Image (tube, helix red, strand yellow):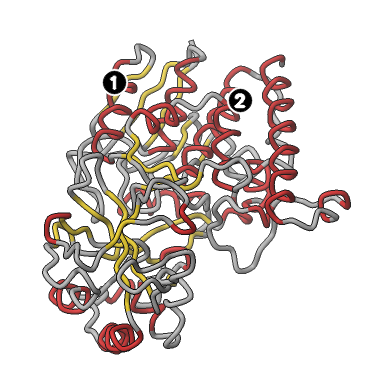
Amino acid sequence: MHTIRILGAGLAGCEAALWLAGRGVQVDLYEQKPARFSPAHKSAGFAELVCSNSLKAERPDSASGLLKLEMESMGSRLLPAARATRVAAGGALAVDRDLFSEQVTRLVEADPHITVHREEVTSIDPAQPVLVATGPLTDGALAGCIAALTGGEELNFYDAVAPIVTAESLDYDKVFAASRYGRGEDDYLNCPFNKAEYEAFHEALVGAERAPRHDADKDLTVYEGCMPIEVMAARGADTIRFGPLRPVGLKDPRTGHRPWANVQLRAENEARTLYNLVGFQTNLKWGEQARVFRMIPGLEHAEFVRYGVMHRNTFLNAPKVLTPELCLQQYPNVFFAGQITGFEGYMESAACGLLAARAVYARLTGRPYTPPPANTMCGALVGYLTTPNKDFQPMGANMGILPRTQAIDAIRDKRERYQALSDAARAAMAAWVEEQEEV
């Protein structure tokens, strides 16, 4: 019987464990919770979502939607769990985080081919097959071991988490329900600013006191994908107004006009008793968060059940150390999956778990393996990870990394062009999966 150790029961680790177990591989899955928690994780459950409950769009002409379709072709087990625990969020797949984690945990623990070990792993034996899916919060002895195996070629950045408020503390005389351009079932709550309110808020946000960083972390890079709102605001008066506070596609029912700026709130749970401030990842001190964010129209009396926090993230310098099979160039038995590789995003992390699982299975069974074609979203992401890049940063699914053809470039309508890219990617992925299954 083939066996594999998987370190980490996040989305990547669980997706990989379930896929491999489905092929009869005996999986020893190691998860350090609840013996040890990272600074961001609070639950002992598997596949815990931290930064957001949104798994992004499902439209096939969107990058996130295409990624999900490719994951379905590869046999994802987490997508059905997500859809079974979804909450309304317009065209996005958002989930009740607790229910999603509970369902994934049950799936993993019930599988007879998976043995769960609730203990921290501090070392890696590169002579034995192992899949490291410990996530972007990997630290301590294990991070040191990975650094030793990779020659110290690792990068660090900061990732910030947005606050959550209670629904009952909102002022519904100001807050209104709507999705941009009428998409969805008015799944977001909106907090509209007029010009004077926004300017006062922006001034307070830029001047607010930030939480101190530890001395060892002061030189780390802030990753653009989770830029703290106060850092973004400091770039200019209109930066956030054209970013997470953009008012386009919305109309304030009180005025009949588009707001000057707008904060959106997204449901955190199915009961809609909790809301996340979309795009408000922050490193402000908690008292400052309460003071400044209560200047948002409708949040004057907001009850914060979680303040934003900022935590240290780690990812590999993948172009220098990883192969297209997602294993180390110098230690081919050591595979990686998830956000530690530079796949950025929840669904991307899960997709990476599926890709790594297939590569591991090929290695264990002596079968040939090649990554998906470059014109698939998964193949393009693997190509991004393994292409030389002196300023490597994590990358999420986006249409910009898919290769173009002359015929596709000739399509003038962006939505139609993206649909054509998606159609080609889905066909290529289906052919790749069939080829892999026949080997």
Q: Secondary structure at mark 2?
A: helix
Q: Quadrant of residue 281?
A: bottom left
Cα distance in 3D space between marks 1 and 2: 25 Å
Identify the residue at image location x=13%, y=75%: 287
Identify the residue at image location x=47%, y=38%: 350
Quarter of the figure with the C terminus: top right
370 left or right, relative to 397: right
Q: Which residue is mark 2?
A: 363
Which of discs 1 and 2 lies nearer the camera? The answer is 1
Q: Secondary structure at mark 1?
A: helix
Please provide percent x and percent y for residue 283. 27, 72
**Number of marks present in the image shown:** 2
Residue 201 sits above or below residue 367 on the image: below
Q: Pick whichever, 228 or 326, lies toward us.
A: 228
Q: Which residue is mark 1?
A: 109
Please provide percent x and percent y for residue 77. 44, 25
